Amino acid sequence: MADPIIQIENIHKHFGKVHALRGVSTSVRRGEVLVIIGPSGSGKSTLLRCINALEPVDAGQVIVDGIPVTGAHKNINAVRAEVGIVFQQFNLFPHLTVLQNLTLAQRVIRKRKVEESERIARALLVKVGILEKESAYPAQLSGGQQQRVAIARALAMNPKIMLFDEPTSALDPEMIKEVLDTMLLLAQEGMTMVVVSHEMGFARAAANRIIFMDEGMIIEETTPEDLFTHPREERTKQFLSKILH
Amino acid sequence: MAISTESSPNVEGGRLLPIPKQIPWWILILAAAGLLILLFVTTSASYQETFGFLWSGVIRTLELTLVAYAVALFFGLVGGLGRISKNPIIYTLSTLYVEVIRGVPLLVVLIYIAFVFAPAASEFLHSNGEALNLPLLDDLGVFFRDDFMRGVLGLAIGYGAYLSEVYRAGIESIPPGQMEAARSLGMSYAQAMRYVILPQAVRIILPPLGNDFIAMLKDSSLVSAIGALPVNAELTLRGRMYSASTFKSFETWNSVAILYLIMSLGLSVVVRSIERRWSIPK
């Protein structure tokens, strides 16, 4: 594949006796949007978290933008500064205002001046549509607003890749769209994205490729349209029949 | 059982004197007691003399508590971080510290520091300072010979152990997602602790920290057992000196108790205002 920014080669991960990832290999090209689906416990979140070493792998290798995430020459903090991640539970810093949430890592890691970090933060708040909440604390925001702040916080580091770990699963239904719209905007701008999500609408609209995982392995890997209309594997069919109503 | 006087007239009728809960009676009682003391102090020469003698003890007690608590906050932070460390050596050392100190009465810790550890440390610094021709080392030994500093050290080591557990509980109460979010933004463990975890943990543990602050103020009275020069004596030792020389036990210990009470209440007001100021808006 041309110009891969993420290379994942035969990775294995155990949680105690559970073999969560059983030899997963794939790669993501620059500017690609990859969606990962699969039943609970299939290893999709674990795979995502291996990309920025939130989960260290037991075997295999991960290389992000030329920087090894695994093995003897790994440079985890360097990779993490290039890879933004958005969590299911938002994980905003509750003791900081929205603006401070966006400026903290810019100042500490990117060594930006206060004015510069605030300028960047405000531009991103405009982008995700909540500039008016810059002085609010996370607990004062709705779930959808919190998740959009979380996306802006990750973007403030100018990441080359954005990871999304079930970004809409903890949201009330009426707030899912505002978060998906923000993600679509990012995809249209050419951001490289890996998204664990069952939002089929988003997958159809934005994904170049979709992976179906089960029991720690990649079962099918194709375009969203192809997977939804012509699933080849029996397990994929079963899974899709449960989530496509 | 919560009883509303409006909605249950039967109960109200059965009671001779309905006590309204919204009036903080304890404050009124304290205020009355305070007025009484004020009356004593302003009119009784005997109490004036007692308070005059005890006053330096009040200052010393406050100094002792503030300095020892600041050091204990530091010891506790180090101990608490050690208790959650994945490094087995750091974990073992900090657990040993916490368990040993927590298992020995504070009074014994104070006596041990004052009469076993401090003289040994002072002697060690003195002999090594001479042998290595480093006067600075010998100068450091002064720290262990000073009676005020020995009290500070004993209280700080004792409370450092208690506070270690408070810090540990506070840090562990922060959801793991916070550390993950900080680390995934590229922060090191130390940066994540400093900017994300500790600011939240400290807010959560403010009530127990304040509690231990006030407890330390009272436990500083134990320092009286290791003795001090009269000018360095804290309130309780000052009280013992005064009552031993004048036999005015009644005035002395009334005054000592009242002074501790005033200091404790003052601190608890301070602690509460800090809690309010630091609370995260919801």
Image: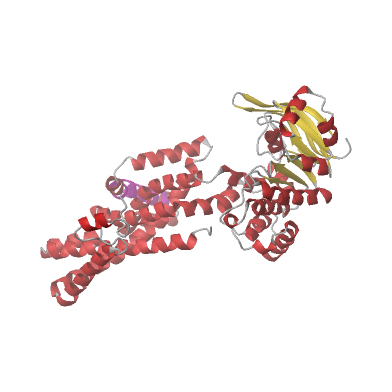
Q: Which residues are magenta?
A: B111-129
Q: Is residue A227 left or right of residue B245?
A: right
Residue nearest the observer in this picture, B79 or A174: A174
Residue nearest the observer in this picture, B102 or A167: A167
Q: Is residue B126 magenta?
A: yes
Residue nearest the observer in this picture, A216 or A112: A216
Question: Residue extending furthest right?
Answer: A2
Residue at x 68% of width, y 46% of height: A86
Residue at x 78% of width, y 42% of height: A201
Residue at x 75% of width, y 46% of height: A162
Picture layout, residue A32 above or below residue B13:
above
Looking at the picture, how far across and down is residue B227, in whole percent?
A: 24, 56
Looking at the picture, how far across and down is residue A79, in whole percent?
A: 72, 44
Question: Residue extending furthest bottom?
Answer: B43
Residue A10 visible, this angle = no
Looking at the picture, how far across and down is residue A103, in whole percent?
A: 66, 58
Looking at the picture, how far across and down is residue A113, in whole percent?
A: 69, 63
Q: Is residue A176 left or right of residue B267?
A: right
Q: Is residue B240 left or right of residue A215?
A: left
Picture layout, residue A105 above or below residue A72:
below
Q: Is residue B266 left or right of residue A161?
A: left
Q: Is residue B171 magenta?
A: no
Residue B278 visible, this angle = yes
Tell me which corner region of the image, top left, top right, bottom left or bottom right, holds residue B70.
bottom left
